[in-house]
Amino acid sequence: MRQSILNPFEKYVGADRIRSPFVLFTFFGIYLFSALIIAKFGIIPGFVLIMLPFGLLYVYLLFMNPVIGLYTAVVAGFLLLGIGRYLPGVQVGLGMDAILILTFLAVFFKQFYTRIDWTPAKKDVMFLALIWLLYALFQLVNPEAQSAAAWFSGRGSALYMFLLIPLTLLLIDSNKKLDIFFYTWGIFSVLATLKGIMQYKFGVDPWEQAWLDEGNASTHVLFGKLRVFSFLSDAGQFGANQGYSAVMATILLLNQKEWHKKLFFTVVALLGSYGLIISGTRGALSVPFAGFALYFILKKNIWVMSSGFLLLVAFIVFFKFTTIGQDNPEIRRMRSAFDPNNPSLQVRLENQKKFKAYLATRPFGGGIGHAGGKARKYLPNAFLTNTPPDSWYVLIWAEQGIVGLTLHLFILFYIVIKASWHVMFRIRDPQVKMKIAALTCGMFGIMAASYGNMVLGQMPTSILIYTSMALMLNSAIYDKEISISEGKIHHNMRNLISSKKSDE
């Protein structure tokens, strides 16, 4: 009887099943239909049809394990805007909205027959995200705002923060899931630099060249030299994000015990640093400078603090007071960041004076989505559209006024200061301490870089920052998990010793 039950599985293997006429005709039918769709409507609808089965499988896995949606958001943050260069006319930015909403639906349906426990999301960081969203919604009735469509285009800074923080608090609830977040981030940071190296060594592809020809060459080809942008939105975002990744990976590297983890984070740190250099982004230098400065303070060690700050001073001296490596275009451009008379800096300061005069009577700003190049589509002749903000904080100031800028800075510094306090005095486990320190120092570096560039609110940095905010202020969960695990080990050891003594 047993033989007859097992026999069908022993007789027919997977390859035999695929060779069955029904399966073969089904596959042939799908691809024939896809070919007809491509011939009739173009490659994009056909590609969508071909990918449909994989999409359905992804949705199934997502609803079984909603944390997959969060990891997907990190991946999409790196890829979406780059994909947009190859799919002109397609609103790829809406992909992030779809991923986050689908993840919320997965959380809901995962616990459809039980009550969702929102307790993990009831934290001060969630309250801050709610306040920021409500202020953004208030901007819809800002008397200075002239376009609801422009508001929708600038929704990400508040909406993504509000969606990502509760999802992170609910779903990344263990050290294993936290580690997967770091590995996902690290892998795509490495891929971004590898793509950047391809651009640096071999030039851009036809789609990237078309993007440069649309007017982006003026900021990305300087003196005949390409500022590398990889598959990210621009060189400024690429440089700052790679510096962000380098800070994160370096801090984690210094506290790893297993060789394969050391190797992984070494690769991420080195390629992240190289990506920063070839981006030609001067402001991105402030990411490692500010990030590591905070790290030296968090270590609470006088020798580490002193030697670390001496190293930072040595870097400043190298760039500001020497001409070593001046023949290298990347070093030469970065060195210009330390020149207070740099023409680019003077233009930015002049623009800030214009904003100051314009916003003196507008405490709530000119409206979300109403400043910078993206607003040209909606308000081509407006003052805010034609005065470059250049800085993330200036953009917030221009669009949401001094009230919005004050609130935004309060939220950022509150999170960094509280996370730093936890690292220095509350977290007991060394590994958890360094994970939170890596996130905190990286975020502080991005905050510093955002004064000179609009990096904090752009993907993938924005997705990483908003996720990190929740992780940084949820450190007690990861610390407690380690303590419980260690407590069980000690308890088992005591029982084992006791049993041995009783046997003797």
Image (tube, grey):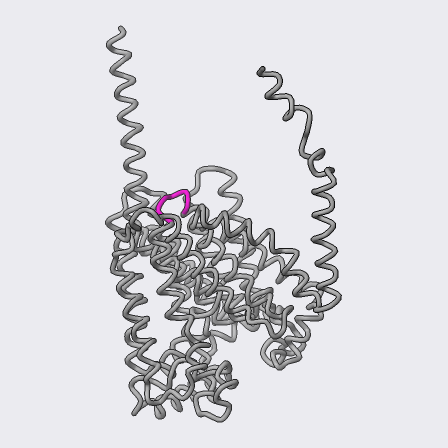
In the picture provided, is 127 more to the left or to the right than 286? left
Does residue 434 show up? no
Q: Where does residue 327 sit, x and y in percent of width and height?
A: 63, 70
Q: Nearer the viewer, residue 387 or 79?
A: 79
Q: Residue at x 28, y 66 (%)?
A: 128
Whether 177 is drawn above or below 130: the answer is above
Q: Where does residue 45 sit, x and y in percent of width and height?
A: 65, 65
Whether 143 is drawn above or below 161: the answer is below
In the picture provided, is 298 more to the left or to the right than 37? left
Indicate whether residue 83 is drawn in magenta: no
Image quadrant in which you'd find residue 235: bottom right
Q: Where does residue 216 sit, x and y in percent of width and height?
A: 60, 78
Q: Residue at x 31, y 84 (%)?
A: 364
Direction top: furthest residue: 504
Does residue 277 show up? yes
Q: Count all numbered tags in the image, as a single digit.
A: 0
Q: Residue at x 41, y 56 (%)?
A: 105
> Which image quarter holds the N terminus?
top right
Image quadrant in which you'd find residue 201: bottom right
Indicate whether residue 176 is drawn in magenta: yes
Whether 381 is drawn above or below 17: the answer is below
Q: Nearer the viewer, residue 239 or 336?
A: 239
Q: Where does residue 57 sit, x and y in percent of width and height?
A: 55, 49
> Which image quarter holds the C terminus?
top left
Residues shaded magenta: 172-177
